[in-house]
């Protein structure tokens, strides 16, 4: 699963003399803005690329102006770097492309698409900035390939530039779901919990929610980005949820999502299972909550979200089976409030930032 390919061999050497040069404030500002654009574009496809990671690329001219910004759209399509170079040729600006900013190390593999490291080497780009090293040991090698002499490119890694630490953290957030699956063989797990001002998760009688339209859009952007939903049998029996993406457009032609139901007593109704399968979902039943992360990792799930009642959330909290925890708290005196707890740089930053009217949130966890 993922980006496993056949590595392109080579003898590599670096150019540390050029790569360690101090950069001016304006140059750093251009890099920062370019990465912001690449990250924003890539975040639009969170969930659409699975089991591949979401990746963005921006091409800059010698003055630091952005020429093209592109992203990987879905498995089997051009990767971000190749698509950006393709667009630059279509727009007749390829000869002005001097610097490439890529949120993830370019691939160095022969697979459904040619290696992006070779595409960059065959372009006018002379400098490549890389947000994150590829966590997949089988898929690495792009940095070394780009540095290969005599026609090697100057390669900068964000991790080597403290002035760009926040940009580096944003790249970590973007890649967190994919990296978690590759490194830990399980998905990144987000708990989404909605409650009223007093902390109750039970909506008023006759209603299915008590949060605002903005909050609903956040919840459905998270569903759109997720590859799987974890829920409990109590939620299924009480609400018969469909877990569809509403309030925001869903990704077209994406792989089917999984729904995992925690059901220790075989109470799952056949009618609900058939309804979900008919809607394009894969339904899995598990008796053991602790085994679900590994189970989802085996299915190539990068990002899973939990939509469940208080009992299952308490068990998940007790077992520590979560990576970040989004709480949306309704308010009668103003907009709903979001809070995030996270065990590392969280991809939720992109979910919360996407809307036209983002809710107030504590983003220290990002």
Image: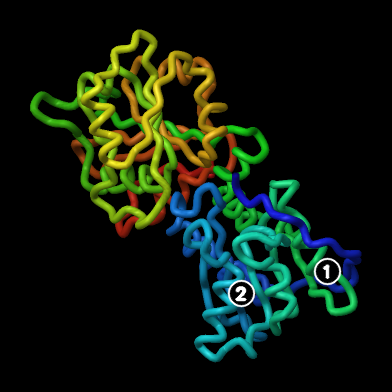
Asked if labels 2 and 1 touch by Cβ distance under 8 angstroms, the answer is no
Quadrant position of residue 11 = bottom right
Locate the N terminus by quadrant. top right
Residue 186 x/y as whole percent: 58, 32
Label placed on residue 230: none
Answer with left or right where residue 111 lies relative to residue 337. right
Residue 23 placement, left or right of 277 = right
Foreground of the two, 338 or 306: 306
Side of 31 where 263 appears, left or right: left
**Residue 70 drawn above or below residue 314:** below
For marks 1 and 2, give the CA distance. 23 Å
- Mark nearer the viewer, 1 or 2: 1
The percent coordinates of residue 10 (x first, y second) are: 87, 64
Q: Residue at x 59, y 78 (%)?
A: 85
The residue drawn where x is 28% and y is 34% is 276
Q: Is residue 161 visible?
A: yes
Examine the rendered structure and indicate whether residue 252 appears above or below residue 59: above
Label 2 element class: helix
Q: Residue furthest top?
A: 265
Residue 30: mark in rendering: 2
**Residue 163 appears in the picture as rendered:** no
Residue 328 placement, left or right of 314:
left
Residue closest to the eye, 170 or 89: 89
Residue tagged 1: 147
Count neighbours of disc 2 (C-alpha within 10 A) and say few if under 14, some if 14 to 19, many if 20 or more.
some
| For marks 1 and 2 on the same chain, the one whose residue lies earlier in the sequence | 2
Q: Residue at x 50, y 49 (%)?
A: 50
């Amino acid at each position: 699963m993922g980006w496993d390919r056949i590595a392109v061999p080579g003898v590599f050497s670096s150019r540390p003399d050029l790569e360690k040069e101090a950069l001016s404030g304006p140059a750093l500002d251009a890099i920062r803005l370019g990465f912001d654009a690449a990250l924003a574009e890539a975040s639009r496809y969170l969930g659409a690329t699975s089991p591949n990671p979401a990746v963005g690329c921006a091409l800059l001219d010698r003055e630091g102006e952005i020429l093209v910004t592109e992203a990987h759209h879905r498995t089997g399509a051009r990767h971000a770097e190749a698509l950006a170079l393709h667009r630059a040729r279509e727009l007749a600006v390829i000869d002005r492309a001097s610097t490439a900013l890529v949120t993830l190390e370019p691939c160095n593999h022969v697979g459904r698409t040619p290696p992006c490291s070779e595409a960059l080497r065959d372009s006018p780009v002379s400098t490549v900035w890389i947000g994150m090293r590829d966590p997949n040991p089988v898929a690495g090698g792009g940095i070394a390939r780009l540095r290969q002499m005599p026609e090697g490119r100057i390669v900068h890694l964000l991790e080597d530039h403290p002035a760009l630490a926040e940009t580096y953290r944003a790249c970590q957030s973007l890649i967190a779901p994919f990296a978690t699956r590759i490194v830990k063989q399980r998905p990144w797990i987000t708990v989404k919990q909605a409650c009223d001002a007093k902390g109750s998760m039970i909506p008023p009688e006759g209603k299915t929610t008590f949060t605002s339209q903005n909050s609903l859009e956040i919840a459905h952007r998270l569903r759109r980005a997720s590859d799987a939903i974890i829920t409990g049998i109590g939620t299924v029996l009480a609400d018969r949820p469909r877990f569809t993406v509403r309030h925001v457009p869903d990704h077209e032609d994406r792989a089917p999502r999984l729904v995992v139901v925690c059901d220790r007593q075989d109470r799952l109704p056949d009618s609900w299972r058939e309804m979900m399968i008919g809607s394009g979902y894969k339904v899995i039943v598990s008796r053991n909550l602790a085994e679900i992360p590994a189970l989802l990792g085996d299915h190539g799930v990068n990002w899973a979200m939990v939509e469940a009642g208080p009992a299952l959330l308490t068990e998940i909290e007790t077992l520590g089976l979560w990576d970040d925890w989004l709480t949306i708290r309704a308010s009668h005196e103003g907009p709903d409030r979001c809070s995030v707890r996270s065990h590392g740089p969280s991809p939720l930053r992109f979910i919360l930032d996407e809307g036209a009217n983002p809710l107030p949130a504590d983003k220290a966890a990002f």
